[in-house]
Image: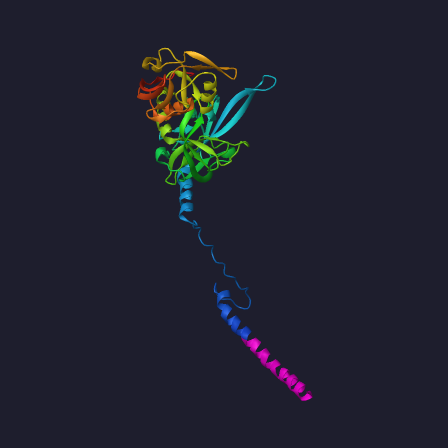
Amino acid sequence: MKQLFSYLSKWRKAQVPMLAAVVVAALVASAAVFAPRMFAQGSHDSGSAPQAVVNAPAPYQPSNNIESQVEAVGKNAGPSVVNVTSTIVSQNFFSQPVPQQAVGSGFIYDNQGHIVTNYHVIAHARNVVVTLKSGKNYQAKVIGKDPSTDLAVLKIQGGQLPPPLKLGNSDRVQVGQFVVALGNPFGLSHTLTFGVVSAKGRIIKSPNGQFVGEALQTDAPINPGNSGGPLLTLGDEVVGINSQIISPSHSNDGIGFAIPSNLVKKIVPQLIAHGQAEHPFVGISGIDLSPALAHYLKQAGVNLPVDQGLMVASVVSGSPAAKAGLKGADQVATVMNTEIPVGGDIIVAINGQKITSFQDLSAYLESEAKVGEHVTLTVDRNGSQQKVDVTLGTRPAGK
């Protein structure tokens, strides 16, 4: 055992110089390998410090094709989107005038300096200022406004303006299609958000109580200040004007609505030419008929042949409805202490499209019809369906 221990001890002692030599050789070899990398920037002598090589960062590349297209929309359309600041004058507790500002968005519509925005952005404004992405401010003139569609047109003059944005065909937009919203939410200028078209054909209420049909629903974040800004396809085409949100918190909850571009094409030229727009008019007042109301009317002794539609309560004298022979109510039924006019025509369709409410009729007229056009109403009269042709008139101011 002593001999074995002595042998191992001698072996270790003998190997120490050998190991040291191997380590030194390895270090020398390592230095030889790394020396060209460390000093590749230039020769040096013993009196100068070595200079480390710093590689330039790789140029940015979009991670995928969708990202690239979204970036392109921001670059191409961004300069043509503007900030709209309107000043109104209200009164404080002491009846003193107090100026207040509202901020919205808009976009350049043509080469004459016309700007499209929402009516509610500039309603009652004493002063309107348009700010470009460059930061340049322009005093804007209100050329026309239409509360029924929540659209307005401004005009600015001076200098070379960014190119106008192209209006696309909102009827061709598909649910699930990618869209980009540009605007100034909460005054944060030139913000881009991204999402999809969540639904088509929504009906939204306009500032004067009328209805806009064929609105686009989107989950692209829209907040206060986005109003009037464009909703664009990845091809840089405007398919909607961001207008409303549904939100208990008054900020984005993923449900926003845009006025369809095809309605913009219909209304904006009128606002530029005349300062106001014409709207089709039938000339009736009505009550929405639902299955629940039909049930209660039946209990009150009124048996209706249908349980959905628009019950004509009255017909405006001299109106298109009166000229076409539509009939209003001729009796009253009491339902839950409320008097309901009954006995008149029940409108169930217009040009073959189902009508279940006054909202449906108003939205169809606004989106699909024009003053002077002929429409065919399908009505239920005393249990039999009839076709009634109506030539649309112009809705009187204030109606």
Asked if residue 7 lies left or right of residue 186, the reply is right
Q: What residue range appears in magenta? A: 1-25
Tell me: residue 345, above or below residue 218.
above
Q: Is residue 14 magenta?
A: yes
Asked if residue 20 lies left or right of residue 288, the reply is right
Q: Quadrant of residue 374?
A: top left
Asked if residue 9 lies left or right of residue 337, the reply is right
Query: Looking at this view, is 245 or 127 the one in front?
Result: 245
Can residue 136 be seen at all in this image of the molecule?
no
For the N terminus, the image quarter is bottom right
Colour convention? rainbow
Q: Quadrant of residue 344?
A: top left
Query: Looking at this view, is 362 or 101 the one in front?
Result: 362
Tell me: residue 146, above or below residue 20.
above
Q: Could you tell me what secondary structure mostly forms the magenta stretch? A: helix
Can residue 257 be seen at all in this image of the molecule?
yes
Q: Is residue 185 magenta?
A: no
Query: Looking at this view, is 130 or 204 the one in front?
Result: 204
The x and y percentages for residue 38 are: 51, 65
Residue depicted at x 56% and y 78%: 22
For the C terminus, the image quarter is top left
The x and y percentages for residue 54 are: 50, 58
